[in-house]
Image: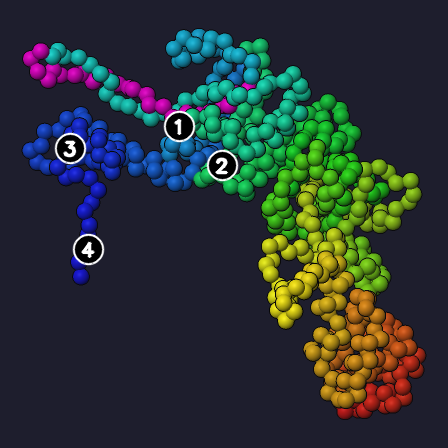
């Protein structure tokens, strides 16, 4: 079967100058048709060059713009030099930029700069400049031009066009205040976060390599992290977060090196330099002291904790935290921050166990978050803190300062006491007016927001457990009803029942519910739980433990006789 075709775009009759007037044809998308005997002109060959160039640029635009590899920017002040390493990049216009060798530019050579800019820019104004690598066509070689008619004369023109790159400075519409360089760079990191300003002033045939500050006609410093980004399509939220993370890491390294070189060994706060920081990133190790429960890096209103983690899990935790909003140190308050102290698998297994309380889980506050976490404060406590100081000293000694990471914590149910907030839920049929009374009944109000205890008890209770561990006797069914009435409405009691059911094998189903009922009536439910958890997990040993401790637990003689029958049935 042949294809069904329709009229193509374009007029097969029109051509030449009329081609420009056709609304449905882009002249750059036309190519020359070659055939024997045709007279070719420069226009015909240039048409093919434009066509191929446009097609290649369309591919480049689809790939995105940014640095593909290399093109690291550095600055030397003695003598003044801008240095760009070899590499490749893609411009927003779809041009591929290639720098094969190191490029060194002297920004103080006013004569050369004036010559390359038609006599302009003999003086560089005070301000901030984007350092860009730009696509440029360079005419090279000489070719003779022969006359095309009797009136023309012989001449010359350039023979080749070489695609090259050129370093340039683009002024940015941003003030350059007389302030500390590191603090200014941190402020610019926040102002340039959304990338809109840079994209509006940087030419589309260029790629930004960094930012340059000029004062008194002299370059002062270069930030190779600002404005620069890897090749990508239109940036989304994740891209901008990664830009912020990369810029923060670079600037934090410069801050720590500057302070170390100046002998400033004391801890500093993030707000001393930064306004905005990413939701995850490194922090100086000396700003925290888990032995005394102290931290200096985050505002006092932040809830800061530290916990050991496996080094292998660090990157995954960081990437998950990067989905959260950036941290505004000047506006945000009451944020949760977790500092991750990475350890090897062997160290984590050994040291984390030493941080876990010997108190059984059932005695803890329900859903206690992060049992390995240690709360840190901005001021030293006036009383001794129970922080497992010796264990944390060992953890801190084994923690690599280069891998110490903080992450912003998402608001969690167990910490807020809020189980859910439903938005735009729609109408509940039960809340609609009753038609039987003429539709005048008051709508039923939605239930109050439930805390985590209520949610747990609604989902895990005696009846839900009985559906899984069913009683196979009338005595067992009666015990379930009694237990549901007398058991306190609290997670601790339900948790004890759940643990006991997990410890007792299904062979003892005919007696387990009666045992739970009698133990609860005599206030020995938690004691029974501790007995079974500490016992060796073996089907005969379970019955032996219950029978031996039966009198202390307050179990009836008849029930203990049934336990003995179940034990003898295994022999």
Q: Is residue 273 left or right of residue 204?
A: right
The magenta region covers: 128-151
Nearest-to-viewer mark from 1 and 3: 3
Q: CA distance from mark 1 to mark 3?
A: 31 Å
**Numbered disc 2: secondary structure:** loop
**Image vertical order of residue 122 relative to residue 393, above or below:** above
Q: CA distance from mark 2 to mark 4?
A: 44 Å
**Numbered disc 3: secondary structure:** loop
**Image vertical order of residue 325 relative to residue 444, above or below:** above
Label total for image: 4
Disc number for residue 4:
4
Q: From the image, tell me which residue sits under label 2.
A: 230
Question: Residues at badges 4 and 1 in contact (C-beta under 8 Å)?
Answer: no
Task: Residue 39 in the image: state x and y as whole percent.
Answer: 9, 29
Magenta includes 129? Answer: yes
Q: From the image, tell me which residue sits under label 1.
A: 205
Task: Residue 293 in the image: state x and y as whole percent.
Answer: 83, 43
Q: Is residue 298 left or right of residue 135?
A: right
């Amino acid at each position: 079967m042949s294809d069904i075709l329709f009229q193509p775009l374009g007029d097969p009759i029109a051509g030449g100058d009329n081609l420009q007037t056709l609304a449905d044809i882009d002249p750059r998308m036309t190519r020359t048709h070659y055939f024997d005997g045709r007279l070719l002109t420069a226009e015909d060959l240039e048409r093919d060059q434009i066509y191929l160039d446009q097609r290649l640029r369309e591919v480049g635009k689809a790939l995105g713009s940014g640095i593909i590899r290399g093109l690291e920017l550095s600055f030397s002040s003695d003598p003044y030099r801008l240095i760009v390493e070899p590499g490749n990049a893609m411009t927003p216009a779809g041009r591929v930029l290639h720098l094969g060798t190191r490029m060194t530019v002297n920004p103080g050579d006013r004569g050369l700069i004036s010559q390359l800019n038609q006599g302009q820019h003999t003086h560089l104004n005070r301000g901030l400049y984007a350092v860009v690598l730009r696509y440029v066509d360079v005419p090279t070689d000489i070719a003779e031009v022969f006359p095309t008619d009797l009136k023309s004369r012989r001449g010359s023109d350039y023979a080749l066009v070489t695609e090259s790159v050129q370093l340039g400075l683009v002024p940015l519409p941003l003030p350059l205040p007389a302030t500390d360089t590191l603090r200014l760079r941190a402020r610019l990191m926040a102002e340039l976060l959304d990338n809109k300003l840079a994209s509006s002033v940087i030419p589309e045939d260029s790629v930004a390599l960094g930012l340059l500050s000029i004062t008194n006609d002299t370059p002062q410093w270069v930030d190779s992290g600002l404005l620069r980004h890897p090749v990508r399509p239109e940036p989304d939220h994740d891209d901008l977060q990664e830009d912020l993370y990369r810029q923060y890491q670079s600037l934090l390294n410069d801050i720590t090196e500057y302070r170390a070189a100046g002998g400033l060994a004391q801890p500093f706060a993030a707000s001393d330099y930064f306004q905005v920081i990413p939701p995850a990133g490194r922090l100086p190790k000396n700003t925290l002291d888990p032995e005394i429960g102290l931290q200096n890096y985050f505002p006092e209103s932040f809830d800061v904790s530290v916990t050991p983690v496996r080094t292998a899990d660090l990157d995954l935790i960081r990437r998950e935290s990067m989905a959260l909003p950036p941290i505004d140190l000047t506006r945000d308050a009451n944020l949760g921050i977790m500092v991750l102290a990475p350890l090897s698998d062997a160290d984590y297994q050994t040291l984390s166990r030493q941080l876990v309380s010997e108190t059984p889980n059932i005695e803890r506050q329900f859903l206690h978050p992060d049992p390995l976490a240690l709360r840190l404060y901005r001021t030293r406590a006036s009383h001794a803190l129970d922080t497992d100081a010796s264990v944390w000293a060992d953890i801190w000694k084994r923690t690599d300062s280069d891998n110490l990471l903080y992450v912003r914590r998402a608001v969690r149910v167990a910490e807020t006491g809020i189980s859910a907030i439903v938005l735009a839920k729609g109408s509940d049929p039960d809340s609609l007016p009753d038609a039987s009374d003429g539709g005048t009944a008051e709508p039923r109000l939605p239930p109050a927001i439930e805390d985590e205890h209520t949610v747990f008890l609604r989902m895990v209770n005696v009846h839900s457990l009985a559906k899984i561990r069913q009683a196979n006797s009338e005595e067992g069914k009666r015990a379930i009803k009694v237990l549901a009435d007398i058991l306190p409405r609290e997670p601790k009691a339900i948790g004890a029942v759940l643990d006991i059911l997990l410890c007792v094998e299904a062979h003892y189903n005919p007696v387990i519910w009666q045992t739970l009922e009698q133990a609860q009536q005599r206030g020995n439910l938690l004691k029974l739980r501790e007995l079974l958890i500490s016992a060796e997990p073996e089907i005969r040993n379970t019955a032996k433990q219950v029978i031996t401790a039966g009198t202390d637990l307050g179990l009836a003689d008849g029930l203990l006789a049934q336990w003995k029958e179940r034990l003898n049935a295994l022999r």
